[in-house]
Amino acid sequence: MLLRLICTAATTLALGGCSGWGADRQLIPVAERDPIGLTGTYVSGEERVKFSAGEDGYVLVGDPDNSDVSGRIVFDLLREEVSEVETDAAPLPRTYLMEVPWMDEGGKATYFYQIVMISGGEDGVSGSFKQFKVLCSSAARALAVRTESELCIFGNYARLREAAFDALSWYDDARMAIETTDFQREGVAGAAVPEPL
């Protein structure tokens, strides 16, 4: 889904079928970019995606079968998840706002946003992550500067984070089904997928 989000942005925009959250400029400030533990190749069904560290808080994303970088994304920590069981093993899952840029043929950038819950790993590298599909809900529309079809366009970092926390509250209370995609680090036996909140 990550690579599809990056690689098919042009098609969805051109067809007017894009849904979710976007912005005309990068909203997550450099000072708010957080390091993550995603390193290596992660798998979800037939989809495989490779993560590596970039400069200035960027995370490089690409196809593990070639050396091309499909995107330079950033993550902004929203919260550390709570657990009912105390353990000294892996760190608790952390939930982030993810910002994915896409450049059109004319060089104009558009940014897309999703929420990602990343699990801890005993070796310091995250074993899995869960990607949430965000919707242009009525609450998100109220926080956005405008909408284009089913895409909420944000113009303010604080309001974008407010929409992210609202979406997480829906997930926490199970008021409606939230579409998620689970990825597990390739070659890690027993890597746990983040548990539902």
Image: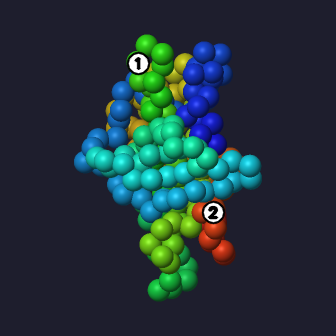
Along the line of sight, the residue nearer the viewer: 62 or 88: 62
156 relative to 133 in the view: left or right: left
Amino acid on which disc 2 is placed: Glu
Examine the rendering and report whether any part of residue 45 can be seen. yes
Q: Residues within 10 Å of mark 2 (few under 14, many from 20)?
A: some
Query: Which of the 4 quarters of the picture holds residue 18?
Result: top right
Q: Which residue is mark 1?
A: 108
Q: Amino acid at mark 1?
A: Lys
From this view, report whether residue 162 is shown above or below residue 149: below
Q: Nearer the viewer, mark 2 or mark 1?
A: 2
Which residue is drawn at the image coordinates 52% and 59% (left, top)? 40
The local secondary structure at tag 1 comes to loop
Q: Which mark is residue 186?
A: 2
Depth check: give the residue in front, 4 or 80: 4
Considering only order in the chain, which callout, 1 or 2, is on the residue closer to the N terminus? 1
Residue 55 appears left or right of 13: left
On the question of residue 133 being in view, the answer is no
Classed neighbour count for the residue bearing mark 1: other residues with Cα under 10 Å, few (<14), some (14–19), many (≥20): few
Query: Residue 142, image x and y in percent?
Result: 48, 30
**164 sits left or right of 133 in the view:** left
Which residue is rendered at x = 55% and y = 83% of the image? Answer: 85
